[in-house]
Amino acid sequence: TNPLSEVTHKRRLSALGPGGLTRERAGFEVRDVHPTHYGRMCPIETPEGPNIGLINSLATFARVNKYGFIETPYRKVVDGKVTDDVQYMSATEEMRHTVAQANASMNPDGSFRNDLVSTRVNGDYTLAPRENVDLIDVSPKQLVSVAASLIPFLENDDANRAL
């Protein structure tokens, strides 16, 4: 069989079923992409039709912890310098931190090149002084699923075409 199909099927998430939603009662707010999905659920890989937004895939580096929460990895930043210490965090834990993007401009010693760094704070995108950054994404591909990460030049594609 197709190995990519098998991996995608095993990393599938569903809001349907016992204790979940039904297709008929799920509104737009449930199906929409939410800031807490960043690095946890792929915003691209979802079926078309009545299941859109109700069936999703885990993002590339995401994992489910022992309590059932989806976590994504971040590298720790100490005094404006990126370390090799990787921490997995849930969405509620992440909200307490200032997180830089994985493609931030860096010096060879692991420090940020610019005084202001593009970050996420409480789900909002902003510029923050490099001293205020706590964490950095491990990879630009942690946002999307395994299958979506294989789309060449995804960042340059029209969003509708990627879907």
Image (cartoon, helix red, strand yellow):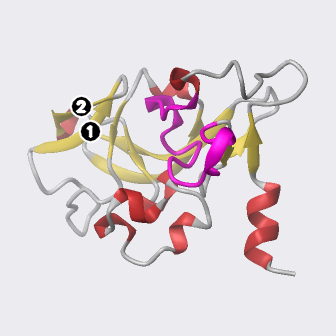
**Front-lying residue, 59 or 47:** 47
Where are the magenta residues, as a range? 31-53
Point out the frontmost of discs 1 and 2: 1
Residue 16 location in percent, x, y? 79, 31
Which residue corresponds to mark 1? Answer: 119
**Residue type pointed to by label 2:** Asn
Residue at 20% from the left image edge and 53% from the top image edge: 112
Numbered mark located on residue 70 in the image: none
Residue 139 location in percent, x, y? 45, 60
Farthest residue to the right: give it.
18
Q: Are marks 1 and 2 in contact (CB under 8 Å)?
A: yes
Residue at 26% from the left image edge and 39% from the top image edge: 119
Q: Taking 76 as reference, is 32 above or below it?
A: above
Q: Quadrant of the N terminus?
A: bottom right
Which residue corresponds to mark 2? Answer: 132
Residue at 61% from the left image edge and 50% from the top image edge: 48
Q: Secondary structure at mark 2?
A: helix
